[in-house]
Image (cartoon, helix red, strand yellow):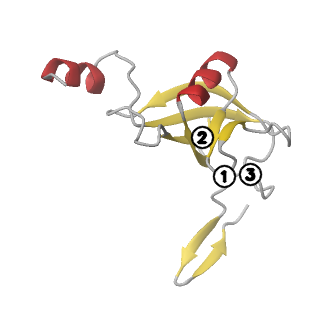
Amino acid sequence: MTEKQQHDVEQGAVFAPKFDSSGLLSAVAVDVETQQVLMVAFMDSEALAKTRASGLAHFHSRSRGRLWLKGESSGNVLKVEEIRIDCDQDAIVLMVRPAGPACHTGERSCFYRRIEGDRLQRLPD
């Protein structure tokens, strides 16, 4: 990549997502109102395109090996208000409005515990 191309990707207006060797980007879902991190997942080019087209968060499920609409079975979809991308375009932040819990355990966020010593401690609600 030339210096100009690098500059355009890192600081300009060129949208050129950089997928890893497995064809994935990291995607962090953040509640647009509370700024709480809700979940981290992965997107391939199809998930990114579906998310942009529909306004609902789609991911690549590594365990299922396929495209996955968040909330397709639970109804707990994530409505995407804004998509942000980091400087080198290999990670995305989805600013979302959740329609219910984001975590498959029923928790509002997948990040509901902290590490204390060698144990996990539930965060206060």
Q: Residue at x 43, y 30 (%)?
A: 85
Mark 3 or 2, nearer chain start: 2
Residue sitting at the far bottom: 118
Q: Quadrant of residue 79?
A: top right
| Residue type at the position of mark 1 | Ser
In this rendering, is residue 55 above or below 26?
Answer: above
Q: Are marks 3 and 1 in contact (CB under 8 Å)?
A: no
Find residue 29 and name its label: 2
Residue that badge 1 annotates: 63
Q: Quadrant of the C terminus?
A: bottom right
Image x and y of residue 112, in percent: 67, 62
Q: Quadrant of the N terminus?
A: top left
Label 3 vs label 1: CA separation? 22 Å
Image x and y of residue 50, in percent: 64, 23
Mark nearer the viewer, 1 or 2? 1
Nearest the viewer among 65 and 78 is 65
Mark 1 neighbour class, 10 Å CA radius: few under 14, some 14 to 19, many 20 or more: few
Say what secondary structure mark 2 lies in.
strand
Nearest the viewer among 94 and 14 is 14
Say what secondary structure mark 1 lies in.
loop
Mark nearer the viewer, 3 or 1? 1
| Residue type at the position of mark 2 | Ala
Label 3 vs label 2: CA separation? 12 Å
Mark nearer the viewer, 3 or 2? 2
Image x and y of residue 27, in percent: 53, 40
In this rendering, is residue 52 above or below 118?
Answer: above
Residue that badge 3 annotates: 108
